[in-house]
Amino acid sequence: MNSTYKRIKLQLQIIRLLFICAIAVGVLGFYEFRPNQSSAETDAENTTLVSPASEPKLAVGSTDPISGFVVDEKGHFELVRTTCGACHSTALVTQNRATRQGWKDLIVWMQETQKLWDLGENEEPILDYLSTHYAPTQKGRRPNLTGIEWYELGE
Ligand code: HEC
């Protein structure tokens, strides 16, 4: 009886010791992997290394490969991309041409019938962008014909 009691006591002590060890490992681990100054710096370095490759700076006048939008100087194409690409393909936008008023009317139509939200202060830059880069193409008189071999009328 006495020896059984001693054995159980020993086992309990071993369990307690293991428990303390586990806590110690846990605490050490926490301090070891806590983001400290130096590892935060490494993170920052990694981010700068990674981000330019994933988001290359697009040249003004080129076409944004994600949306097909013309890249403008002010970078408003990104705003238009996120706003006007939220519900439908941006191709629906890029294949259309309208005046500033035309784009405004379209936005109002979508607000009234298609649950488009109030664009707030974004409306101005969006309209600026659309009316500049997706304006109606001016088609005047057809250009003169070229490369025609005229034949002499005669006899
Ligand atoms: C809340 C959703 C939503 C957002 C955001 C949205 N649209 Fe639309 N838009 C629609 C729906 C719905 C249609 C109708 C699609 C259809 O007919 O298949 C539509 C249609 C269009 C059309 C085609 C109109 C036509 O005559 O067929 C154009 C152009 C357009 N949107 C431009 C824009 C522009 C520019 C923006 C950003 C300012 C925008 N959309 C943002 C919902 C949205």
Image: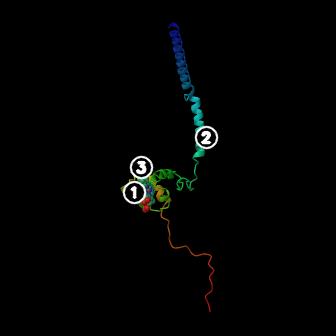
Q: Is mark 1 on a helix, strand or loop?
A: helix
Which residue is depicted at the point 46% across and 54% down?
84
Residue 11: x and y in percent read 53, 14
Spot occupied by residue 145 in the image (x, y as percentages of width and height): 58, 76
Label 3 vs label 2, nearer the camera: 2
Of residue 47 and residue 57, the one placed in the foreground of this image is: 47
Query: Is the CB–ligand 1 distance for label 2 below 8 Å?
Result: no
- Ligand 1 quarter of the rendering: bottom left
Q: Distance between the residues labelled 1 and 3?
A: 17 Å
Q: Name the residue under label 2.
A: 49
**How many marks overall?**
3
Q: Is residue 100 visible?
A: no
Numbered mark located on residue 121 in the image: 3
Give the distance between the C-alpha atoms of the residues marked 3 and 2, in whole angstroms: 34 Å
Picture quarter containing residue 147?
A: bottom right
- Select label 1 or label 3 by which is in front: 1
Quadrant location of the C terminus?
bottom right
The reply, left or right, for residue 145 in relation to residue 76 is right
**Which colour style is shown?**
rainbow
Residue corresponding to mark 1: 110
The kind of residue on which mark 1 rests is Met
Asked whether the viewer can see residue 110, the reply is yes
Q: Give percent across and percent down for residue 77.
A: 50, 53
Q: Earlier in the sequence, mark 3 or mark 2?
A: 2
